[in-house]
Every structure is written in structure tokens, then in C-alpha cells.
Image: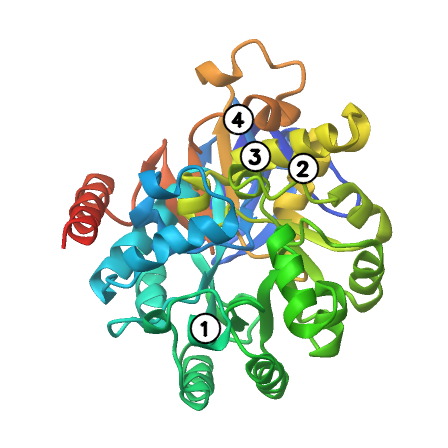
Amino acid sequence: MTKTLLLKNARLIATMDDGERELENGYILIRDNRIEAVGPAEECPGQADRIVDLTGHVVIPGLINTHHHMFQSLTRALPAAQNGELFDWLSALFPVWRNITPQMQRAASRTAMAELMLSGCTTAADHAYLHVNGITLDDSVQAATEMGIRFHGARGAMSLGQSQGGLPPDALVEADENAILKDMQRVVETHHDHRPDAMVRVALAPCSPFTVTTDLMREAATMARSLKVGLHTHTAENWKDVAFSKERYGMTPTEFTGEVGWVGDDVWHAHCVHLDDPGIALFARTGTGVAHCPCSNMRLASGIAPVRRMLDAGVKVGLGVDGSASNDSGNLLDEARLAMLSARVREQNPGHMTAREALRIATRGGAEVLGRGDALGRIQAGYCADIVAFRTDDIAMAGSLGDPLASLVFCTPPRAAWSIINGRVVIEEGHLLTRSLPHIIEEQNRMAARLLNP
């Protein structure tokens, strides 16, 4: 790692600090893995161990992905699942996922991480609920370490098979919930880092109420709080999800969430498309976070989450690309664009979300949802050096320089030009440095072919 790294001459730096400063022709000085100073060109230091000239670039904090299922990148656009809503989509994919191996899991994770990083993402959470054929969260952590991305591994689980009234086939679930809890404790003790600049953190994440028992939800919550780690799950994802909760538990997803203790500033829920007004009030009051996944929600026709109402109520909201089999992409900058557009469509009001609000959700919002608001999501002295830069002379940005920051969302350039994660340059001039991208793609396609044609 370079001891000091100076980024200078940036066309615009959007700090996302409390003052929402946007610096023209600014600089950022990084020492080791922290931001030491940010300011205008006239205050720029003259020397550093490495200097990068960012003339013509827009610079923002690294984007933060709060929800994913990285293994699903092996089954994008599967014909049998292209036109199904959530439950039908899952039912089409479950038999295929039954055959995923640890090698496939690692390949899929590298693919998902590379795609995220190239879109400007520097921190990614992965809801890893598939544990078959020897797959463990260790496979995902290994991939993250290789790729150099800051990683939140959520040790998920499915324990409620079809024979017990759940959605997944019995062959796909972990029937022994004591063994699940034991492994949850193991991965926390093995991989979780409590430090503010941690590169790896672990959360506990029973998949959803239609895949796990109430007992596991309660026990996981108790364990997470004893170990001081986060909690993550899916909530109110579509109308069938809501109907299942009412039929099986006799309560709405919001009521169920409160009943099993899944609220608090250590908890974040994915999707929340059908979060009702009491649920929004509950989340705001308790500091519970939401991972908004607009592309996946639309792909599966789940609906458009009431994000504007959540934000106005004070709910913490971040962005998630969700699984690549329900998104078929992993571009987090594009997710910010879709968040902005879907919020406008929901209320037929273009004022319901601005480009800057979408970027704030994608940066500071994600940091707050993951419990990292004191170290990530801003370009500010003392914060971790997670920074991305986009060229303004890309074809996607041509003609948009009246507001280059908003243009990142409206025009979405396809690839970050530079990415620094924890003070380390991982993308330089659009090229991934940590792993060979052609090798990642070749291995992914080989693993996917093996999975689909066993």
C-alpha cells in the first residue's frame, strides 16, 4: 500500500459530508488507508509518494451495496425463470442451485465483485443463504480478499423445507438449526472484524419468513446481539410474501418483524416493497435499515418500494443490486439511476427523488444501513479511503457537463476510471488490477456451463 496518495485536479469532488460540499478542481490526500485532507487546488500539497492527476474526472465516495446473492450470477436470464414473480422464479431456480459447489460459489463471487467494483462499488454485502455441497461463508470471504473489496458477509440460512410448509425443497435446506447456529458463531469468530476500518464483517441472516422457522429467527437475533454483529433478512418483498406471513403467522410482515425482535439499528431488511405505514414508523423509530433493490423489484414485478415515504419518515435506506438472477446485472451506479426513476414513477412526480439524493442513498445511506456511518460513505478527513472517479469525457457523459455530478445518475457511465479501496488502487484507468478480468469471465462461464449441464 502506498504510504501517501494524492488525487489532484479533480473536476468535481462530491464529499457527501454534512455540509454536502462539492469542490471544483479539488484534491484528496490519503495517508495509508485514511483520508487525511480534502480541499481546493490552492491548498493542494506539492508532494506525495504517488500522485494521480484526475483532470476531467468526477470523484465520489465509493458506492455501497447493501444486498446481494452473489452465487446467483451463475444463473442469469435462465429461460425457465425469466417471466416469473418471486415465488415462481425461486421455484424454477431452486433445482439448479442445488448443484452449486464451493468452486462455483467462489467463481460467482469473484464475478459479482468485479462487476460491482467496475461500477464504482467499494463495499458489498452478500446475503449468502445457500449452503449445499460443502459451501460455507468462507468461500465468499476468500473471494473478497482476492478481489480487494470491502465485504459484509451475511451468513444466511434456509431451514423450512416444503414438507414443513416452506417454499424451498427439503434437499436445499439445512434441517439442523443447531448446526446452523453453531456455524453462524464460527464464521463470526473466524472472520468478523469490529474495527472501524474493517475489510470483513459478518452478519447473521436467516433468509426470509417463508424459508426459516420462527425459532431460528429468534435464536439468530439473540446470538447476533451477544456477538455484537448485524442482522439481515428479506421483508415484505411481494404480495405472496405478505400473504404467506398472514397465513402462517397470523400477522403482517411488519408485525412479525417486531414479534421476533428484528428491529433496531443493528438490523437491515431487503426490499420492503410492501412495507406498510406502521412498518415505516416502526423502522424509523427503531433505527432499522432498508436495502432498496429497484431493478430486482421491477424485474420480478414485485412493485415499487415507498422509498420517499421511508426517507421522509427518517428510515435509513441504502441500495442493493440483489441477486444477479433477479437483476441480471450488478451495476450499482445504474441501481442509483433506477432508484431515482422508480421513485418518480411511483408518485408520478419527478421531484420525488433527485440525482443527488440517489447518490447519497448509494453512499452515506448504505454506510448507515451497514452500521459504518462513522467510517464509510464520505470523502472527509478521518474516513476510510474508499473513493471512485469517473471520466467526464466518456461517450455516456458527452453533452452533460452542465452538472457532471447529476450526470453520473442520469447518464450512468459504464465503468469507473479509478477506484481506491482502503487506500489501495484497485481500478486504474478502467482496468481491474486485483484479478485478471478475462480469467474471471472464462471461469464463470465454465462453471455456469457445468452447473446447467451436469
Secondary element at tag 2: helix
**Residue pointed to by mark 2:** 358
User: Residue flagged by tag 2: what amino acid is it?
Assistant: Ala
Task: Give 104 or 376, whichever is nearer the viewer.
Answer: 104
Upstream in sequence: badge 4 or badge 2: 2
Mark 1 vs mark 3, foreground winner is 1
User: Could you tell me residue 375's position as x and y percent?
Assistant: 62, 60
**Residue pointed to by mark 4:** 412
User: Residue flagged by tag 3: what amino acid is it?
Assistant: Val
Gap in angstroms between the C-alphas marked 3 and 2:
15 Å
Gap in angstroms between the C-alphas marked 1 and 3:
38 Å
Upstream in sequence: badge 3 or badge 4: 3
Binning the other alpha carbons within 10 Å of mark 1 as few (below 14), some (14 to 19) or many (20 upward) gives many
Q: Is residue 86 left or right of residue 440?
A: right
Residue 288: quadrant of the picture: bottom right
> Can residue 301 be seen by looking at this rendering?
yes
User: Could you tell me residue 156's position as x and y percent?
Assistant: 47, 70
User: Residue flagged by tag 1: what amino acid is it?
Assistant: Ala
Task: Give 167 or 97, whichever is nearer the viewer.
Answer: 167
User: Residue flagged by tag 4: what amino acid is it?
Assistant: Thr
Gap in angstroms between the C-alphas marked 4 and 2:
12 Å
**Residue pointed to by mark 1:** 157
- Please determine whether, in this image, residue 373 is positioned above or below residue 390: below
Gap in angstroms between the C-alphas marked 3 and 4:
14 Å
Mark 3 vs mark 4, foreground winner is 4
Q: Which dot marks residue 59?
A: 3
Mark 4 vs mark 1, foreground winner is 1
Residue 116: quadrant of the picture: top left
